[in-house]
Image (cartoon, helix red, strand yellow):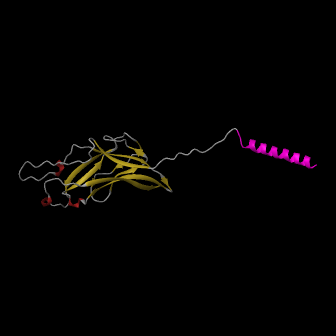
Amino acid sequence: MKKTLLSILSIMLVGTVSQSAFAQDNSTDNHDVGLTIPEVALLDLEKTGGDLDITLTFTAPNEAGEKLDFSTASTTDEVWLNYSSIVGVSGVSVTSRKVTVKASPSISTFPADLKVIAAADASNGDGTIGTPTAAVTLTDSDQDLITGIGSAYTGTGPGNGHKLTYTVAAKTGGDYADLRYGTEKVTVTYTLSDDTVAL
């Protein structure tokens, strides 16, 4: 009786294990595949020849009694602003980016107003390229130059991204007596930073 009961239990146990093993397999199955996209925020200035420094040169007046015309400031150098960006979604807002610009040391001692404007993108990249603002009169505080950058890339090197153009104007509230001949320099800094836009 004990042997018979043990045999019946053994058969039941084997049958249960077999059914469990076969129950796990089906004609279809699935698993998740995740894509981990990195956050990207890279900015670069490019100029043919490598050296990024530029010099604006003025044309001296050629008639006695005339003043220096600041609108004659010119350069043959072309500087291009390139960037790569991949943004993310956070809570109820979408993260976008912008490029800001400032000059240092304090440009308050500079003998003229220095302005920069970014041209529209050269369209050699893809994605949500940023939109340039109007010309920015540089100060030692960050100001928006390009806004609305999403996941995008401009292409790299001269001829790609946004061409930067510098212009000079007589200093607002300045005094002609403060002008001195020679070369004065400021450092212009561009920064790619997050800019959150609410949905």
The answer to which of 18 and 28 lies nearer the viewer is 18
Q: Main secondary structure of the magenta part?
A: helix
Residue furthest out toward the right: 1
Depicted 182 relative to depicted 79: above or below = below
Please state which of residues 52 and 196 is positioned toward the viewer in this rendering. Answer: 52
- Residue 38, x across and y down, in percent: 47, 48
> Vertically, is 177 above or below 23?
below
Instruction: Answer left or right for 184 relative to 103.
Output: left
Question: To which quarter of the image does residue 144 belong?
Answer: bottom left
Q: Is residue 198 left or right of residue 25?
A: left
In depth, the one of 25 and 191 nearer the eye is: 25
Residue sitting at x 57%, y 44%: 33
Q: Which residue occupies 37% across, 46% down?
A: 83
86 vs 16, left or right, is left
Q: Position of residue 141 (x, y in %)?
A: 30, 59
Q: Please, which residue is most extreme toward the left here?
A: 64
The residue depicted at 5 percent of the width and 51 percent of the height is: 64
Q: How many numbered marks are there?
A: 0
Relative height, residue 167 to residue 49 (above, below): below
Residue 168: horizontal and vertical position, in percent? 21, 52
> Which residues fall within the magenta stretch?
1-26
Q: Is residue 17 magenta?
A: yes
Q: Nearer the viewer, residue 90 or 181?
A: 181
Residue 159 forms part of the magenta stretch: no
Residue placed furthest toward the top? 27
Residue extending furthest front?
A: 3
* Residue at 66% in and 41% down: 29
Using residue 162 as the reference point, say whether residue 150 is left or right of it: right
